[in-house]
Image: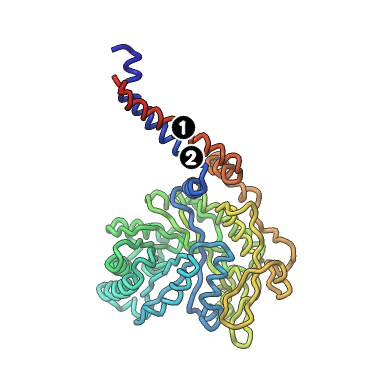
Amino acid sequence: MSKSKKIFSKRNIVLFIVVLLILGSGIFLLGTKTGRIFLRYRGEMGGEGFIWGINGHPGGIVYKEDAINSNQQMTLLKNLGVQWYRNDWWNVSDAGRYDMIVEAAEKNNLHLLPIISTYDSRTFATATSTQLHDTAYSFAYRISSRYKGRLNYYELDNELDNKCIKQDVSGYLTSHYDEAILRGLDEGVRQGDPQARTLVNAAGWLHYGFFDRLLADGFNFDILGWQYYSGDITDVSSLHINVAQKLASYGKDIWVTENNIQNGTYGNSEQQQADYIAKTAQQISKLPGFKAYFVYELLDELNFDTTKPQEAHYGLIKTKLVDNRWQVDSLKLAFNAYKNLISSSLATSPSSPKASLTPSSSPGDSFSAVPSAASSAGLTASPKSSSAPSVSPSPSSISISKKLNQSFQAGVENVNSSKKSRWLFNLIGGILILAGSIYLWRSFRKRKFS
Protein backbone atom coordinates (compact mmCIF):
# COMPACT_ATOMS: atom_id res chain seq x y z
CA MET A 1 0.00 0.00 0.00
CA SER A 2 1.37 3.46 -0.93
CA LYS A 3 2.10 6.16 1.64
CA SER A 4 -0.79 8.27 0.36
CA LYS A 5 -3.22 5.43 0.84
CA LYS A 6 -1.93 4.87 4.41
CA ILE A 7 -2.32 8.55 5.21
CA PHE A 8 -5.83 8.65 3.80
CA SER A 9 -6.91 5.34 5.22
CA LYS A 10 -10.40 4.97 6.66
CA ARG A 11 -9.05 4.99 10.22
CA ASN A 12 -6.98 8.15 9.79
CA ILE A 13 -9.76 10.04 8.04
CA VAL A 14 -12.26 9.16 10.77
CA LEU A 15 -9.79 10.23 13.47
CA PHE A 16 -9.13 13.51 11.65
CA ILE A 17 -12.84 14.25 11.37
CA VAL A 18 -13.49 13.40 15.03
CA VAL A 19 -10.67 15.72 16.12
CA LEU A 20 -12.04 18.42 13.81
CA LEU A 21 -15.51 18.10 15.32
CA ILE A 22 -14.22 18.14 18.89
CA LEU A 23 -12.01 21.16 18.20
CA GLY A 24 -14.85 22.99 16.52
CA SER A 25 -17.26 22.18 19.33
CA GLY A 26 -14.76 23.38 21.93
CA ILE A 27 -14.14 26.68 20.16
CA PHE A 28 -17.87 27.17 19.64
CA LEU A 29 -18.50 26.43 23.33
CA LEU A 30 -15.90 29.00 24.31
CA GLY A 31 -17.88 31.63 22.44
CA THR A 32 -21.13 30.89 24.28
CA LYS A 33 -22.20 32.26 27.64
CA THR A 34 -22.54 28.79 29.15
CA GLY A 35 -19.11 27.81 27.88
CA ARG A 36 -17.45 30.92 29.22
CA ILE A 37 -18.97 30.43 32.66
CA PHE A 38 -17.98 26.77 32.69
CA LEU A 39 -14.42 27.38 31.57
CA ARG A 40 -13.90 30.30 33.92
CA TYR A 41 -15.29 28.21 36.79
CA ARG A 42 -13.01 25.29 35.99
CA GLY A 43 -9.88 27.24 35.15
CA GLU A 44 -9.97 30.10 37.61
CA MET A 45 -11.14 28.12 40.60
CA GLY A 46 -8.81 25.15 40.44
CA GLY A 47 -11.25 22.58 39.04
CA GLU A 48 -14.09 22.61 41.53
CA GLY A 49 -14.53 26.29 42.29
CA PHE A 50 -12.92 28.05 45.24
CA ILE A 51 -15.31 28.53 48.14
CA TRP A 52 -15.59 31.88 49.92
CA GLY A 53 -17.38 31.74 53.25
CA ILE A 54 -17.82 33.27 56.67
CA ASN A 55 -18.70 32.10 60.18
CA GLY A 56 -21.69 33.06 62.29
CA HIS A 57 -23.61 31.82 65.31
CA PRO A 58 -27.35 31.65 64.56
CA GLY A 59 -29.04 31.25 67.92
CA GLY A 60 -26.30 33.17 69.71
CA ILE A 61 -27.21 36.32 71.65
CA VAL A 62 -26.44 38.75 68.83
CA TYR A 63 -27.67 36.37 66.11
CA LYS A 64 -31.02 35.47 67.71
CA GLU A 65 -34.26 35.74 65.80
CA ASP A 66 -35.35 38.65 68.01
CA ALA A 67 -32.04 40.40 67.29
CA ILE A 68 -30.20 40.19 63.95
CA ASN A 69 -32.29 37.34 62.62
CA SER A 70 -31.73 34.65 59.98
CA ASN A 71 -33.12 36.69 57.09
CA GLN A 72 -30.99 39.69 58.01
CA GLN A 73 -27.93 37.47 58.23
CA MET A 74 -28.60 36.06 54.75
CA THR A 75 -28.92 39.55 53.31
CA LEU A 76 -25.63 40.52 54.89
CA LEU A 77 -23.99 37.40 53.44
CA LYS A 78 -25.25 38.13 49.93
CA ASN A 79 -24.13 41.73 50.27
CA LEU A 80 -20.66 40.49 51.22
CA GLY A 81 -20.58 38.09 48.28
CA VAL A 82 -19.84 34.83 50.12
CA GLN A 83 -21.50 31.61 49.02
CA TRP A 84 -21.15 29.65 52.28
CA TYR A 85 -22.17 30.18 55.90
CA ARG A 86 -20.52 28.10 58.62
CA ASN A 87 -22.25 27.81 61.98
CA ASP A 88 -22.41 25.57 65.04
CA TRP A 89 -25.22 23.09 65.61
CA TRP A 90 -25.29 21.78 69.15
CA ASN A 91 -26.76 18.49 70.26
CA VAL A 92 -30.44 19.12 71.00
CA SER A 93 -33.43 16.85 71.34
CA ASP A 94 -35.35 18.81 68.68
CA ALA A 95 -33.30 18.77 65.49
CA GLY A 96 -36.00 20.88 63.87
CA ARG A 97 -34.71 23.99 65.62
CA TYR A 98 -32.37 24.42 62.66
CA ASP A 99 -35.16 24.43 60.06
CA MET A 100 -35.29 28.23 60.05
CA ILE A 101 -31.65 28.74 59.12
CA VAL A 102 -31.80 26.00 56.48
CA GLU A 103 -34.90 27.51 54.90
CA ALA A 104 -33.38 31.01 54.96
CA ALA A 105 -30.23 29.72 53.24
CA GLU A 106 -32.23 27.87 50.58
CA LYS A 107 -34.35 30.94 49.93
CA ASN A 108 -31.21 32.99 49.30
CA ASN A 109 -29.32 30.31 47.33
CA LEU A 110 -26.60 30.08 49.98
CA HIS A 111 -24.85 26.99 51.30
CA LEU A 112 -24.53 25.99 54.94
CA LEU A 113 -21.63 24.24 56.61
CA PRO A 114 -23.05 23.02 59.93
CA ILE A 115 -20.63 22.11 62.69
CA ILE A 116 -22.39 19.26 64.44
CA SER A 117 -21.17 19.09 68.00
CA THR A 118 -21.83 16.83 70.97
CA TYR A 119 -18.72 17.66 72.99
CA ASP A 120 -19.48 18.51 76.60
CA SER A 121 -16.53 19.22 78.89
CA ARG A 122 -18.61 18.13 81.89
CA THR A 123 -18.99 14.58 80.58
CA PHE A 124 -16.00 14.17 78.29
CA ALA A 125 -13.59 13.32 81.10
CA THR A 126 -15.85 10.69 82.71
CA ALA A 127 -17.79 9.18 79.79
CA THR A 128 -16.59 5.95 78.21
CA SER A 129 -15.55 5.80 74.57
CA THR A 130 -18.73 3.86 73.79
CA GLN A 131 -20.93 6.50 75.41
CA LEU A 132 -19.18 9.31 73.54
CA HIS A 133 -19.49 7.44 70.27
CA ASP A 134 -23.17 6.58 70.69
CA THR A 135 -24.19 10.11 71.69
CA ALA A 136 -22.37 11.54 68.68
CA TYR A 137 -23.81 8.94 66.32
CA SER A 138 -27.38 9.59 67.46
CA PHE A 139 -27.22 13.34 66.95
CA ALA A 140 -25.39 13.14 63.61
CA TYR A 141 -27.92 10.64 62.30
CA ARG A 142 -30.90 12.78 63.34
CA ILE A 143 -29.44 15.82 61.61
CA SER A 144 -28.23 14.22 58.38
CA SER A 145 -31.38 12.17 57.86
CA ARG A 146 -33.61 15.19 58.49
CA TYR A 147 -31.76 17.38 55.98
CA LYS A 148 -30.86 14.66 53.48
CA GLY A 149 -30.59 16.16 50.02
CA ARG A 150 -30.67 19.69 51.43
CA LEU A 151 -27.31 19.80 53.19
CA ASN A 152 -24.36 18.06 51.59
CA TYR A 153 -21.46 18.85 53.93
CA TYR A 154 -21.02 18.39 57.68
CA GLU A 155 -18.14 19.47 59.86
CA LEU A 156 -17.55 16.95 62.64
CA ASP A 157 -17.39 19.07 65.78
CA ASN A 158 -14.89 21.88 66.19
CA GLU A 159 -11.23 21.74 67.17
CA LEU A 160 -11.47 18.30 68.69
CA ASP A 161 -7.71 18.14 68.44
CA ASN A 162 -7.62 20.59 71.36
CA LYS A 163 -10.06 18.45 73.30
CA CYS A 164 -8.45 15.12 72.50
CA ILE A 165 -4.87 16.28 72.90
CA LYS A 166 -2.97 15.20 75.97
CA GLN A 167 -1.38 17.66 78.33
CA ASP A 168 2.08 19.16 77.82
CA VAL A 169 2.53 18.04 74.20
CA SER A 170 2.84 20.06 70.97
CA GLY A 171 0.53 17.95 68.82
CA TYR A 172 2.72 16.81 65.95
CA LEU A 173 2.81 13.12 66.96
CA THR A 174 -0.05 10.64 66.65
CA SER A 175 0.49 9.52 70.24
CA HIS A 176 -0.53 12.99 71.44
CA TYR A 177 -4.24 12.30 70.76
CA ASP A 178 -7.18 10.13 71.71
CA GLU A 179 -10.43 9.77 69.70
CA ALA A 180 -14.08 8.54 69.92
CA ILE A 181 -16.57 11.32 69.17
CA LEU A 182 -15.41 11.75 65.59
CA ARG A 183 -16.18 8.20 64.60
CA GLY A 184 -19.67 8.45 66.00
CA LEU A 185 -20.33 11.69 64.15
CA ASP A 186 -18.95 10.38 60.87
CA GLU A 187 -20.84 7.11 61.02
CA GLY A 188 -24.07 8.88 61.97
CA VAL A 189 -23.82 11.34 59.08
CA ARG A 190 -23.14 8.61 56.54
CA GLN A 191 -25.94 6.42 57.85
CA GLY A 192 -28.42 9.29 57.61
CA ASP A 193 -27.21 10.51 54.22
CA PRO A 194 -24.72 8.30 52.35
CA GLN A 195 -24.09 11.07 49.80
CA ALA A 196 -22.99 13.65 52.39
CA ARG A 197 -19.34 14.60 52.79
CA THR A 198 -17.60 15.05 56.13
CA LEU A 199 -14.94 17.50 57.25
CA VAL A 200 -12.60 17.25 60.23
CA ASN A 201 -10.76 20.34 61.40
CA ALA A 202 -7.83 21.13 63.65
CA ALA A 203 -7.04 24.32 65.53
CA GLY A 204 -3.89 25.09 63.63
CA TRP A 205 -0.39 25.59 64.98
CA LEU A 206 1.40 22.22 64.57
CA HIS A 207 -1.54 19.95 65.24
CA TYR A 208 -1.25 17.96 62.01
CA GLY A 209 -0.36 14.94 64.15
CA PHE A 210 -4.11 14.77 64.77
CA PHE A 211 -4.68 13.91 61.11
CA ASP A 212 -1.80 11.45 61.09
CA ARG A 213 -3.49 9.64 63.94
CA LEU A 214 -6.93 9.61 62.30
CA LEU A 215 -5.63 8.37 58.97
CA ALA A 216 -3.42 5.76 60.62
CA ASP A 217 -6.50 4.48 62.42
CA GLY A 218 -8.38 4.18 59.13
CA PHE A 219 -10.71 7.13 59.70
CA ASN A 220 -11.38 8.20 56.12
CA PHE A 221 -13.04 11.62 56.34
CA ASP A 222 -13.49 13.59 53.11
CA ILE A 223 -12.16 17.11 53.74
CA LEU A 224 -9.38 18.41 55.94
CA GLY A 225 -10.17 21.62 57.84
CA TRP A 226 -7.60 24.01 59.30
CA GLN A 227 -8.06 27.04 61.56
CA TYR A 228 -5.57 29.69 62.56
CA TYR A 229 -5.41 33.32 63.66
CA SER A 230 -2.62 35.66 62.60
CA GLY A 231 0.63 34.35 61.21
CA ASP A 232 1.49 32.71 57.90
CA ILE A 233 0.50 29.10 57.26
CA THR A 234 3.61 28.60 55.14
CA ASP A 235 5.95 29.67 57.94
CA VAL A 236 4.81 28.46 61.36
CA SER A 237 6.67 28.68 64.68
CA SER A 238 10.35 29.34 65.25
CA LEU A 239 11.01 26.15 63.27
CA HIS A 240 9.60 27.86 60.12
CA ILE A 241 7.47 24.85 59.19
CA ASN A 242 5.45 25.04 55.97
CA VAL A 243 2.21 23.65 57.38
CA ALA A 244 0.38 24.28 54.09
CA GLN A 245 2.76 21.90 52.34
CA LYS A 246 2.32 19.30 55.08
CA LEU A 247 -1.48 19.49 54.84
CA ALA A 248 -1.39 19.20 51.05
CA SER A 249 0.63 15.98 51.39
CA TYR A 250 -2.45 14.20 52.75
CA GLY A 251 -4.06 14.36 49.31
CA LYS A 252 -7.38 15.73 50.56
CA ASP A 253 -9.16 18.97 49.81
CA ILE A 254 -8.23 21.55 52.44
CA TRP A 255 -10.68 24.14 53.79
CA VAL A 256 -9.53 26.96 56.05
CA THR A 257 -12.68 27.14 58.16
CA GLU A 258 -11.64 29.93 60.56
CA ASN A 259 -9.22 32.78 60.07
CA ASN A 260 -8.79 36.36 61.23
CA ILE A 261 -6.19 38.50 62.90
CA GLN A 262 -5.79 37.41 66.52
CA ASN A 263 -8.50 39.03 68.69
CA GLY A 264 -10.04 40.85 65.72
CA THR A 265 -10.27 44.58 66.35
CA TYR A 266 -9.66 44.16 70.07
CA GLY A 267 -6.12 45.46 70.33
CA ASN A 268 -5.83 45.79 66.54
CA SER A 269 -7.02 48.59 64.27
CA GLU A 270 -9.66 48.05 61.60
CA GLN A 271 -6.95 48.66 59.03
CA GLN A 272 -4.78 45.89 60.46
CA GLN A 273 -7.69 43.46 60.45
CA ALA A 274 -8.63 44.32 56.88
CA ASP A 275 -5.06 44.08 55.60
CA TYR A 276 -4.50 40.71 57.26
CA ILE A 277 -7.73 39.18 55.92
CA ALA A 278 -7.18 40.47 52.38
CA LYS A 279 -3.60 39.21 52.29
CA THR A 280 -4.31 35.83 53.87
CA ALA A 281 -7.46 35.08 51.89
CA GLN A 282 -5.64 35.77 48.65
CA GLN A 283 -2.73 33.57 49.73
CA ILE A 284 -4.99 30.67 50.69
CA SER A 285 -6.90 30.82 47.39
CA LYS A 286 -3.66 30.18 45.50
CA LEU A 287 -2.13 27.42 47.64
CA PRO A 288 -2.15 23.89 46.14
CA GLY A 289 -4.94 21.74 47.55
CA PHE A 290 -6.74 24.57 49.33
CA LYS A 291 -10.37 24.82 48.21
CA ALA A 292 -12.11 27.11 50.71
CA TYR A 293 -11.58 30.08 53.01
CA PHE A 294 -13.93 31.17 55.80
CA VAL A 295 -13.45 34.39 57.76
CA TYR A 296 -14.33 34.36 61.44
CA GLU A 297 -16.87 36.00 61.82
CA LEU A 298 -19.85 37.99 60.46
CA LEU A 299 -20.90 40.06 63.52
CA ASP A 300 -19.20 41.46 66.60
CA GLU A 301 -20.51 39.63 69.67
CA LEU A 302 -20.35 42.46 72.14
CA ASN A 303 -22.30 40.44 74.67
CA PHE A 304 -18.87 38.97 75.48
CA ASP A 305 -17.26 42.38 75.90
CA THR A 306 -17.18 42.33 79.69
CA THR A 307 -16.32 38.65 80.21
CA LYS A 308 -14.24 37.67 77.13
CA PRO A 309 -13.42 40.88 75.24
CA GLN A 310 -10.89 39.08 73.07
CA GLU A 311 -13.80 37.05 71.63
CA ALA A 312 -16.14 40.00 71.09
CA HIS A 313 -14.56 41.91 68.21
CA TYR A 314 -13.88 39.40 65.44
CA GLY A 315 -16.84 40.49 63.31
CA LEU A 316 -16.67 42.25 59.96
CA ILE A 317 -19.73 44.21 61.10
CA LYS A 318 -20.10 46.25 64.26
CA THR A 319 -23.19 45.73 66.39
CA LYS A 320 -24.95 47.84 69.00
CA LEU A 321 -27.57 47.36 71.67
CA VAL A 322 -30.67 49.52 71.16
CA ASP A 323 -33.65 49.15 73.50
CA ASN A 324 -32.25 45.84 74.69
CA ARG A 325 -32.12 44.50 71.12
CA TRP A 326 -28.93 43.87 69.14
CA GLN A 327 -28.75 45.65 65.80
CA VAL A 328 -26.25 46.23 63.02
CA ASP A 329 -24.18 49.35 63.63
CA SER A 330 -21.67 49.80 60.77
CA LEU A 331 -19.36 47.94 58.45
CA LYS A 332 -15.72 47.57 59.35
CA LEU A 333 -12.98 48.13 56.82
CA ALA A 334 -12.48 44.37 56.59
CA PHE A 335 -16.00 43.91 55.21
CA ASN A 336 -15.21 45.70 51.96
CA ALA A 337 -11.66 44.35 51.84
CA TYR A 338 -13.07 40.81 51.81
CA LYS A 339 -15.98 41.73 49.55
CA ASN A 340 -13.69 43.30 46.96
CA LEU A 341 -11.35 40.32 47.01
CA ILE A 342 -14.23 37.89 46.44
CA SER A 343 -15.64 40.02 43.65
CA SER A 344 -12.24 40.26 42.00
CA SER A 345 -11.61 36.53 42.31
CA LEU A 346 -14.98 35.52 40.91
CA ALA A 347 -14.65 38.15 38.16
CA THR A 348 -18.29 39.10 38.53
CA SER A 349 -17.62 42.67 37.43
CA PRO A 350 -14.69 44.96 36.56
CA SER A 351 -15.05 46.62 39.96
CA SER A 352 -17.11 45.85 43.00
CA PRO A 353 -18.94 48.80 44.60
CA LYS A 354 -18.73 49.34 48.32
CA ALA A 355 -21.64 47.92 50.22
CA SER A 356 -23.76 49.87 52.66
CA LEU A 357 -26.58 48.66 54.84
CA THR A 358 -29.58 50.36 56.29
CA PRO A 359 -32.04 48.87 58.77
CA SER A 360 -35.62 48.39 57.65
CA SER A 361 -38.38 50.35 59.29
CA SER A 362 -39.79 47.42 61.18
CA PRO A 363 -38.00 44.99 63.50
CA GLY A 364 -37.33 41.58 62.02
CA ASP A 365 -37.24 42.69 58.40
CA SER A 366 -34.13 41.99 56.41
CA PHE A 367 -31.53 44.60 55.67
CA SER A 368 -31.21 45.96 52.18
CA ALA A 369 -28.20 47.15 50.25
CA VAL A 370 -28.42 50.83 49.36
CA PRO A 371 -26.18 53.46 47.70
CA SER A 372 -24.08 55.97 49.57
CA ALA A 373 -27.21 57.57 50.96
CA ALA A 374 -26.88 55.03 53.76
CA SER A 375 -24.19 57.26 55.20
CA SER A 376 -26.97 59.42 56.55
CA ALA A 377 -27.94 56.49 58.72
CA GLY A 378 -24.39 56.14 59.99
CA LEU A 379 -23.78 52.85 58.18
CA THR A 380 -20.93 53.72 55.88
CA ALA A 381 -18.29 51.18 55.02
CA SER A 382 -15.67 53.04 57.04
CA PRO A 383 -16.37 54.87 60.28
CA LYS A 384 -13.26 56.97 59.72
CA SER A 385 -13.73 58.15 56.17
CA SER A 386 -16.49 58.54 53.61
CA SER A 387 -14.12 57.70 50.79
CA ALA A 388 -13.40 54.22 49.55
CA PRO A 389 -11.37 52.35 52.16
CA SER A 390 -7.69 51.98 51.53
CA VAL A 391 -7.98 48.24 52.09
CA SER A 392 -9.29 47.53 48.61
CA PRO A 393 -7.23 44.69 47.21
CA SER A 394 -3.76 45.73 46.20
CA PRO A 395 -2.79 45.56 42.50
CA SER A 396 -1.36 42.13 43.12
CA SER A 397 -4.61 40.85 44.61
CA ILE A 398 -6.80 42.08 41.74
CA SER A 399 -4.55 40.84 38.97
CA ILE A 400 -4.42 37.17 39.88
CA SER A 401 -5.59 36.20 36.40
CA LYS A 402 -2.58 38.01 34.89
CA LYS A 403 -0.02 35.76 36.53
CA LEU A 404 1.85 33.48 34.16
CA ASN A 405 0.59 30.35 35.85
CA GLN A 406 -2.99 31.59 35.37
CA SER A 407 -2.86 32.93 31.84
CA PHE A 408 -5.72 30.64 30.89
CA GLN A 409 -8.11 32.57 33.12
CA ALA A 410 -7.02 35.83 31.57
CA GLY A 411 -7.82 34.52 28.12
CA VAL A 412 -11.24 33.41 29.25
CA GLU A 413 -11.90 36.78 30.84
CA ASN A 414 -10.98 38.51 27.58
CA VAL A 415 -13.53 36.36 25.81
CA ASN A 416 -16.07 37.16 28.47
CA SER A 417 -15.63 40.91 28.04
CA SER A 418 -15.43 41.13 24.25
CA LYS A 419 -18.44 40.64 21.99
CA LYS A 420 -16.22 40.61 18.90
CA SER A 421 -14.16 37.75 20.34
CA ARG A 422 -17.30 35.80 21.17
CA TRP A 423 -18.63 36.17 17.62
CA LEU A 424 -15.24 35.17 16.22
CA PHE A 425 -15.10 32.02 18.33
CA ASN A 426 -18.66 31.15 17.35
CA LEU A 427 -17.85 31.66 13.66
CA ILE A 428 -14.61 29.64 13.68
CA GLY A 429 -16.15 26.85 15.72
CA GLY A 430 -19.22 26.73 13.51
CA ILE A 431 -17.11 26.56 10.34
CA LEU A 432 -15.00 23.72 11.71
CA ILE A 433 -18.06 21.76 12.81
CA LEU A 434 -19.75 22.32 9.45
CA ALA A 435 -16.62 21.38 7.47
CA GLY A 436 -16.11 18.23 9.49
CA SER A 437 -19.75 17.21 9.12
CA ILE A 438 -19.76 17.79 5.34
CA TYR A 439 -16.49 15.88 4.92
CA LEU A 440 -17.81 12.98 6.95
CA TRP A 441 -21.10 12.89 5.04
CA ARG A 442 -19.40 13.02 1.62
CA SER A 443 -16.87 10.38 2.55
CA PHE A 444 -19.51 7.91 3.63
CA ARG A 445 -21.70 8.77 0.64
CA LYS A 446 -19.01 8.17 -1.96
CA ARG A 447 -17.52 5.26 0.00
CA LYS A 448 -13.96 6.09 -1.08
CA PHE A 449 -12.32 4.62 1.97
CA SER A 450 -9.48 2.25 1.31
Front residue of this view, candidates 213 and 288: 288
Element type at mark 2: helix
Residue 257 image position (x, y, % from top left):
47, 62
Element type at mark 1: helix
Residue 338 image position (x, y, % from top left):
59, 60
- Quadrant assignment for the C terminus: top left
Front residue of this view, candidates 330 and 126: 330
Circle number at residue 432: 1
Q: Within the image, what quadrant is residue 201 found in?
A: bottom left
x 57%, y 72%: residue: 299
As drawn, the residue found furthest toward the top would be: 2
Residue 353 image position (x, y, % from top left):
66, 60
Q: Is residue 122 above or below residue 253?
A: below
Q: Is residue 32 above or below residue 208?
A: above
- Quadrant assignment for the N terminus: top left
Circle number at residue 28: 2
Q: Does any portion of residue 180 appear in the rendered image?
A: no
Front residue of this view, candidates 276 and 383: 383
x 71%, y 74%: residue: 378
Under mark 1, the amino acid is Leu
Identify the mark nearer the N-term, 2 or 1.
Answer: 2
